[in-house]
Image (tube, rainbow, N blue to C red):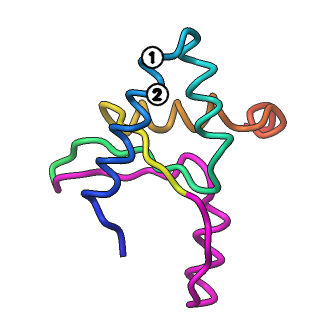
Amino acid sequence: MLDFDELRELAADVRVFVDVAEDKAEALRAVIAAYDVVLAIFPSEEGMGLHVVKGREILNKITKSRTHAIYSHTAIAVPDLEHAEVLKYLTSPVEQRIAA
């Protein structure tokens, strides 16, 4: 079960980390590289939208096995789904971007 308050807090921590970094793009890449699962959160008509930026395979395995697994996760606040999709594309491995 997702805790939306936790995701908001994680996104706030990431925002502070990126804001104080000299190279903001590198800081964002470092955050994404450091976690197993990264969710983009954004405002939506339902309250909060979610998009998996990294770790979909891990989440699928957990869902299919119906077990609990230990994995690290964080959230990044973005303005909308389009920005979440672009963030996923730009931070995916080069091989995946070429194949797309």
Q: Which image quadrant for residue 46? A: bottom left
**Residue at the spot of label 2:** 17
What residue sits 32% from the left and 35% below the top?
Answer: 80
> Where, quadrant-wise, is the N terminus in this rendering?
bottom left
Q: Which residue carries the number 1 mark?
A: 20
Dot 1: element: helix
- Along the line of sight, which residue is nearer the eye, 30 or 60? 30
Q: Check disc 1 and give the amino acid type.
A: Val
Q: Which residues are magenta?
A: 46-72
- Horizontally, is 5 left or right of 14 in the view? left
Percent position of residue 43, x then y: 22, 42
Question: Real-space Cα distance between discs 2 and 1?
Answer: 6 Å
Q: Residues within 10 Å of mark 2 (few under 14, many from 20)?
A: some
Q: Is residue 63 magenta?
A: yes
Q: Quadrant of residue 30?
A: top right
Quarter of the image where the C terminus is located: top right
Q: Is residue 5 above or below residue 68?
A: above
The structure residue drawn at horizontal position 77% and vertical position 40%, both measured from the top left corner, is: 96
Give x and y (percent) for residue 69: 61, 79
Q: Residues within 10 Å of mark 1 (few under 14, many from 20)?
A: few
Q: Residue sitting at 27 percent across and 59 percent down?
A: 4
Q: Does 49 sit above or below residue 70?
A: above
Q: Which mark is residue 54?
A: none
- Mark 2–mark 1 contact, CB under 8 Å? yes
Does residue 24 lie above or below 52 as drawn? Answer: above
Identify the residue at the far top of this view.
22
Label 2: which secondary element: helix
Residue 47 rendering spot, x and y as whole percentages: 17, 53
Q: Amino acid at mark 2?
A: Phe
Picture residue at 55% right of the left edge, 81% below the top: 63
